[in-house]
Image (spheres, coloured by chain):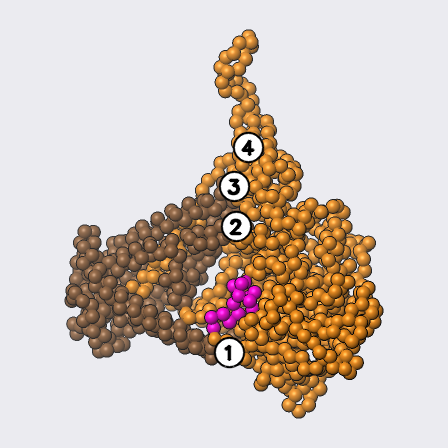
Amino acid sequence: MLGVLRAAFGQVIARPRLVVAVYVVNVLLAIPLVVAMESVLADSIGDGIYQESVRATLDGAWYSEHTGRYDTGLGSTFTPSSVLGPGAMLDNLDAWLEGKLVAVDPSVFGMVLLWAFAWLGLQGAVLERFVHGGAAGPSSFAAAALRHLGRMLQAAAIGLLAYGMLWSLVGDWVKGIDNASIDVTSEVTMLWRLAPAFVLLVLGFHLVRLVIDYTKVAAVRERSGFVLPALVRALSMIARRPLLAVLGYLVPGLLIAAWMGVWLLVAPGGASSSWVSLILTVALTQLFIIGRLVLRLFQLATAVQVYGVAADG
Amino acid sequence: MVDRQTLRHHRRQPSPFESTPFDDHSSRTDTDRSTSALIRRRPWLCGLIVCLWAGSLLAQVGEAPTGDFGVERVAEVPRVDPDPGFEAGLPALRAESPRNANYRIDATYDPTTKVIDGSLVLTWRNIQSTSTAELSFHLYWNAWRNDQSTWLREDWMRGRGHWTGKKVPDDAWAWQQVDSFRVGGDELPWRYIAPDDGNEDDRTVFHVDLPRAVSPGEEIEVEIDFRSKVPRTFARVGFRGDYVFAAHWFPKLGVFTDDGWVTPQFHSATEFFSDYGRYDVALTVPAGWTVGATGRLVAIEEQGETATHRFEQNDVHGFAWTASPDFISIERRFERPGLPEVDVRLLVQPDHLAQADRLFDASFAALESYGTWYGPYPYDYMTVVDPAYGSRTGGMEYPTFYTCGTRLSNPLGSGSPEGVTIHEAGHQFWYGVVGSNEFDHAWIDEGFNTFSTSRTEWVHYGPVYYSKRYFDPPGKSFGGFWRRLFPGLEWHAPTALRRRGRLSRSDSLTSDALAVPTWKHLPHEVGNLSYSKTALWLTTLERWLGWEKLQRGMSIAYRRGAYRAPTPEELFAALEEGAERDLDAFFDHVYYRSALFDYAVEKAGSRSVVPKGFIEQDDGELGLSKPDDDAEPMYRTDVVVRRHGDGVFPVDILLVYTDGNEERVAWDGEDRWHWIVREGPAKLERVVIDPDRVLLLDLDWRNNSRLMKGDRFAARAWAARWAGWVQDLFLTVGGFL
């Protein structure tokens, strides 16, 4: 297993341009929204002394007016938790947990959809690079992204179907638990009753993702037009080498979790009153984003290595 | 992070179960050892973590607001202590209430059927100057008898929708039945009435014709046998498992005034109104249960499987109680120099035992602040209830008895459970001692108390920070099991600033004037008007007149209003007396009318006084003007300000010049616009209307000022910070793909 991890890590480290490519797409797609948000905030702050008080700290008086002015649309996505400390990560994780990521504000939804397509394409190209060593230059990288987009879309569709079922199943279960707990008077008891639902959700999510990751690897390896056979082969591989398959997914997954845990502790929580603190805050945030991307690529590389070991003997 | 000054208020003594210094030392040794090993094996990882930490710390350097923004960002921390001699000239708190509605109640709660079976003897004395030959009673719980009641119809309009869209369990509904109504041993007939809306399906008020009139000063004794089915919670009354909370659970007499009986139906957005009296109540519940109630517990008598708990209290206008086998009862005494001692009993859920200190502290903070500011708490007893999880009975006041409410995760500095505890404890003053007709004037107790709550929070705890609850499963919101504090945003200061947002994003200010009886208000705006608007105009008065004058006025109102329901006019007179000035115009705007306040800078700028174009030359002929390079530059500054709203309030206008000089211009605020012209050696740097933020009802502070050389740094900085949310959102969504 250590050899697999070392090889996977080596694949990511040896190809920094992959990280750069994925990161650049992430940033480029965020920029239009950030520019639009800057206009919203400039309007909300106005040309008076809020410029100074909001510059120094997230002025509560201004924010209460801002929420009154922008209770829907892009401006409504600007909340204290979205800009302070690890709040952005927590907000998104919370939305993930509650199944509310699909309910993201319409003003952001379009760009999220665009990212979804871009990310699927990028995954195809990255896997092509890891599996076949191709897609080395920018043009061949883009071509690989386009070539594998169909496969990635099919795999994502299967995954989304499974996630939908999982969230629906857990949601119904939670409602059932709630109805059966109508006379529970202790929060601790309620938490214990809900704990299995939380566990099922997290385990179920990662189980689906594990299968889909190996399915993508199989699809790219074999360049199959349809993903269903790749799914069958991925399941077969997992059945043959379950420990290896799970560890190959779990170790990078735990590293991602650890990275997010570190961010929870060190994310700058205050406001920006100077260029220095702003630059440092933004730089640290970008470091966190890059770290997550690197570790996700590491997870994909590990899947490639594991699949290779299992398939090639 | 919460600053040290704030933490000082929150720090608690270590529990004997916490680790000892010896434990600390051993664990540190292990940690040191493993850290050394990690550094040896993974230097790059440790370096990365150190970099993150260092960067994080550096990024927070200088983040505390240090600039002078030309405004007072938050008011100075107010004092608890009044001026020496504050009480001089103030009316004394009356010794006792009229005690004209006295109840003796004997009731048994059956936890299986959830029915309270009771009988009461009401002794009522007519304290008005006219006779009456009728009586009028509330049966509040019939509001939840079925969905045709006025309460549930209005609740739908408020958008609260108790049980809306859900299958209502059979045991969720409630009812109240009068089985027997006797006067002088004679059974009397009674009938339901709906004096407010004529809703024939509403059963919350009943009327009785007496065989003879009750004259002024005369007393009448009424005996009633009744049964009340406890609901699953509506309006913070109900049961959950073995926990039960009962308020307004018995037939309650209305209030007789010179204009007749005031017994409104139960409305969704308003509360109650009753006469003061003595309550002597015996409650029988299963043995082993803990009971808390209005008044002092005077006896417990066990009878095998049941136990009867007897409570007594004078000079209150209601009686509520709670019972549960799970409560942990803790008693402490409130003692402060100059204030009467109060025995405080806390009934806390086992889950929340660790927060008992915080609940006591908050209750004591209210007793100290309100007692010092307005007048003493005249009862010697108080019971604080931490309600059962999920019971939705928290955050409600009853005489000498109130519910707070907390969760497992409530970090210090989040304002919870301190805020709600102070608020409900504060209602013991503004609701308990000073009564009010809450059907008509909900703003009196809620508004005065909200204002005082914010002030007390500020005095005792300092800033409250923004926090957010996380960790809910899909399918159902449990309110989030984990609360995280974001110390980067002071969420509300003594001014209850965040309430401005609520007003500006609703049409409350134009929906109804406060003078309109509250039960006639647009139901979903009642909270904004009663709580927020009143708290904001009181804070405006504080900033305008000064705290000492407002405090004096409120103290006069408290002392004169004790044990009765003062009219709004009486309260305004007390505030004017404290202020030593006529405030009619102010009350006309904020109470009698729905005036909107919005002052704005329309135009502002400076230019050289040297004319451009043709001027008369020394020879008397017209010629083009030429700049005099040797002369000191002089500038003409023009500022035009406007009054967009129909509300009028005197405001200061602050002019700050580039040489640092400042000037305050007083404007009575009456004209629709006002033009200020100045000449001087420096250009205008900024103009700020109402720089001290006195007028908290000004809808839009954004247009109150203008910087001559503004920039977009703040917008850019925060948009850049927000980028992290978008990028993280992409990655989180990507996790599914």
Q: Secondary structure at mark 4?
A: strand
Residue A301 occupies which quadrant of the picture?
bottom left
Whole-angstrom CA distance, mark 1 to mark 4, is 68 Å
**Residue holding disc 1:** B169
Q: Chain of mark 3?
A: A
B304 or B189: nearer the viewer: B189
First in sequence, mark 3 or 2: give its number: 3
Q: Position of residue B489 (x, y in %)?
A: 52, 54
**Residue holding disc 3:** A48
Residue contact at pointers 4 and 2, CB within 8 angstroms: no
**Labels 1 and 4 positioned on one and the same chain:** yes
Camera-side mark, 1 or 2: 1
**Residue holding disc 4:** B684
Q: Position of residue B638 (x, y in %)?
A: 56, 30
Q: Chain of mark 2?
A: A
Q: Secondary structure at mark 3?
A: loop
Residue at image point 59% right, 27% down: B679
- Which amino acid does the dot numbered 2 rest on? Glu
**Residue holding disc 2:** A65
Residue B155 occupies which quadrant of the picture?
bottom right
- Which amino acid does the dot numbered 4 rest on? Leu
Can the viewer see residue B154 in this picture? Answer: yes
Camera-side mark, 1 or 4: 1
**Labels 4 and 2 positioned on one and the same chain:** no
Does A197 sit left or right of A18 as displayed?
A: right
- The hue used for chain A is brown
Q: Chain of mark 4?
A: B
